[in-house]
Image (tube, rainbow, N blue to C red):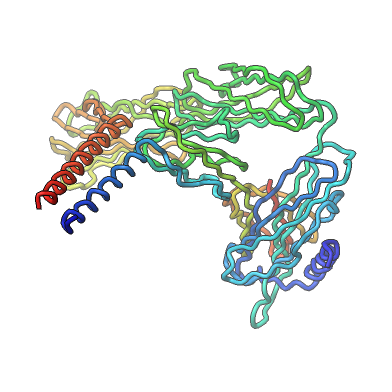
């Protein structure tokens, strides 16, 4: 086999690999993320591959997708419009001709976080918090929304828990 | 050291910390601490032993010590900690730990029982001394143990999907049987109420059983003519002779007022032009404090008018006319670019206008209205597929051509 023939053979092989990869994308929808992850992001970005164009995105707490939330999506990513409740979700995308991706999974967990400065406290977590405030006058409680800042005394002991 | 020993030591540390704390809150430097998850729920099983992980987050990437302890309570002896002091450096985003749960053989009181695992920040002492104010900042991860109720006991959670006007609205009704017995027959009925509490629609699920300590989700879909606005949903679950309810407000679409048309009647150049502006409230509730701002510019982009309408209220789904007045003294005949901005509830609707001023007439065209429909063809999956299939066939043909051509040439040599 000549050297020239050999190089053209390589070109042909590469071209065929490209063709096969494209075919796989045409007849297979790979999911990218999240896949079994745990996240505190209540609006996680769901992404997938493939060349199907418009697809139906499905999200359910039931791995059998008994009562899914569905959304028609152009493209290969979807971010929920409203924050997801805490829990484990299963997701997949289905093309108009019924081709389905594998099922992905994500667990959205709550995060109780606070930041405190001179005379203020901010809820920096992903859930409203119930704030227990302890002063010399006794115990009081209040609910602080996500990203909400409240005024507190510098001498107050505070404990934040998920509301 | 045993877990209980650590537990006791931790309590001592807390007391010492509370007594000797020199925290720097008053100095202006921020304290920050986080914990995830905020809570872990487990169903009661006699003698259950389990480890539960949690993570403490160093939000501000600083050096800090965190003391971890179990808050005293009726069920605090169910939990034992593995770590009672955790030291963070500025490089640490977070650190994980865990606690062990050991449940008793029986619990008298049904319901959800809570144990608080507290992580309290102990900031480093302020360098160079200074005035400190003693105060602590703590976050909690909760252990929630669900002890079943005797018999059948259902609770409800209602979630509503987001929808635009005219789109179906999905309701997800989670019925959880927290009892010790199976529910043989449960059915959800959901009433949708409008802003004046009038019933708009009633949806019913099928009937289903719910096993003890299990959850069943009913999906109900409202496909009626949904106008934008706020609604109220009341769901009732009837199960084996018992009833429980849950309710929730939900919104369809977005609060929006449209500008339908703008015209001027009985106009003479040099006089005051009265702009009649027709607006329509697309929301299903009254919107108060609505006003408009009309800005007219000459060829050089210089403002020749900047006038406001009076403020008004617009009823639910109401069409209304509001007015703006332009004194045209010194204004020349010709075309003027204009912009009308409607303000309401912290939102705006903005329209670009073309204003043609004549001696006895002003014609106002809202840009984008009546300019002809634009049809956008989308290439769906079929189009993409066809294109790729053609590409695939072409590439295979080219490859085959190369292959045979060079093979023949090689053989000829």
Q: Is residue B93 left or right of residue B369?
A: right
Taking depth in this image into account, of B156 and A75 the one nearest to the observer is A75
Which residue ends up furthest to the bottom in the rendered image? B128
x%, y% of residue A155?
72, 65
Query: Vertical placement of B5 versus B342: above or below?
Result: below
Q: Is residue B189 left or right of residue A17?
A: right
Count of labels in the image: 0
Residue at 13%, 36% in the rendered image:
B334
x%, y% of residue A37?
56, 49
Taking depth in this image into account, of B94 and B19 the one nearest to the observer is B94
x%, y% of residue A38?
58, 49
Q: Examine the image and state in which quarter residue B187 appears.
A: top right
Which residue ends up furthest to the left in the rendered image? B412
Q: Is residue A69 left or right of residue B97?
A: left
Query: Vertical placement of B162 versus B54: above or below?
Result: above
Taking depth in this image into account, of B285 and B289 the one nearest to the observer is B285
Q: Is residue B395 left or right of residue B70?
A: left
Point out the image quarter for the N terminus of chain B.
bottom right
Residue at 45%, 24% in the rendered image:
B167
x%, y% of residue B63?
62, 72
């Amino acid at each position: 086999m000549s050297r020239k023939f050999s190089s053209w053979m390589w070109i042909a092989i590469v071209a065929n690999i490209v063709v096969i990869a494209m075919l796989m994308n045409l007849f297979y929808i790979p999911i990218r993320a999240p896949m079994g992850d745990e996240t505190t992001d209540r609006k996680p970005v769901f992404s997938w591959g493939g060349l199907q164009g418009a697809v139906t995105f499905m999200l359910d707490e039931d791995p059998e997708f008994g009562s899914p939330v569905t959304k028609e999506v152009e493209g290969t990513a979807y971010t929920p419009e409203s924050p997801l409740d805490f829990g484990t979700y299963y997701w997949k995308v289905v093309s108009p001709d019924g081709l389905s991706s594998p099922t992905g999974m994500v667990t959205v967990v709550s995060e109780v976080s606070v930041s405190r400065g001179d005379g203020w406290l901010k809820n920096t977590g992903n859930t409203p918090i119930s704030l227990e405030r302890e002063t010399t006058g006794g115990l009081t409680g209040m609910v602080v929304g996500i990203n909400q800042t409240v005024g507190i005394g510098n001498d107050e002991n505070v404990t934040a828990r998920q509301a | 050291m045993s877990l209980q020993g650590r537990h006791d030591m931790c309590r001592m540390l807390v007391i010492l910390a509370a007594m000797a704390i020199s925290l720097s809150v008053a100095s202006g430097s921020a304290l920050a601490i986080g914990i995830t998850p905020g809570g872990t729920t487990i169903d009661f099983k006699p003698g259950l032993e389990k480890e539960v992980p949690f993570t403490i987050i160093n939000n501000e990437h600083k050096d800090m010590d965190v003391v971890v302890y179990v808050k005293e309570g009726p069920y605090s002896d169910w939990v034992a900690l593995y770590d009672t002091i955790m030291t963070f450096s500025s490089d640490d985003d977070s650190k994980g730990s865990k606690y062990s749960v050991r449940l008793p053989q029986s619990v008298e009181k049904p319901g959800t029982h809570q144990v608080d695992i507290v992580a309290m920040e102990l900031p480093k002492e302020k360098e160079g001394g200074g005035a400190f104010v003693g105060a602590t900042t703590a976050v909690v991860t909760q252990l929630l143990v669900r002890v079943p109720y005797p018999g059948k006991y259902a609770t409800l959670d209602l979630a509503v999907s987001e929808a635009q006007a005219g789109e179906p609205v999905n309701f997800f009704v989670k019925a959880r049987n927290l009892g010790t017995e199976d529910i043989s027959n449960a059915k959800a009925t959901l009433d949708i109420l409008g802003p004046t509490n009038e019933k708009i629609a009633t949806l019913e699920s099928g009937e289903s059983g719910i096993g003890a300590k299990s959850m069943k989700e009913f999906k109900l879909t409202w496909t009626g003519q949904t106008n934008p606005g706020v609604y109220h949903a009341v769901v009732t679950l009837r199960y084996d002779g018992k009833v429980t309810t849950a309710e929730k407000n939900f919104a369809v679409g977005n609060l929006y007022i449209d500008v339908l048309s703008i015209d001027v009647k009985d106009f003479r150049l040099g006089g005051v032009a009265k702009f009649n502006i027709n607006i329509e409230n697309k929301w299903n509730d009254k919107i108060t404090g609505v006003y408009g701002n009309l800005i007219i510019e000459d060829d050089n982009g210089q403002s020749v008018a900047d006038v406001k309408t009076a403020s008004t209220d617009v009823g639910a789904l109401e069409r209304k006319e509001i007015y703006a007045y332009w004194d045209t003294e010194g204004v020349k005949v010709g075309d003027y670019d204009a912009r009308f901005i409607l303000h309401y509830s912290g939102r705006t609707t903005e329209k670009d206008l073309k204003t043609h001023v004549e001696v006895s007439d002003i014609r106002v065209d809202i840009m984008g209205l009546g300019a002809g429909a634009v049809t956008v063809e989308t290439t769906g999956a079929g189009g993409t597929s066809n294109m790729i299939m053609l590409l695939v066939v072409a590439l295979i043909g080219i490859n085959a051509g190369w292959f045979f051509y060079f093979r023949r040439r090689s053989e000829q040599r």
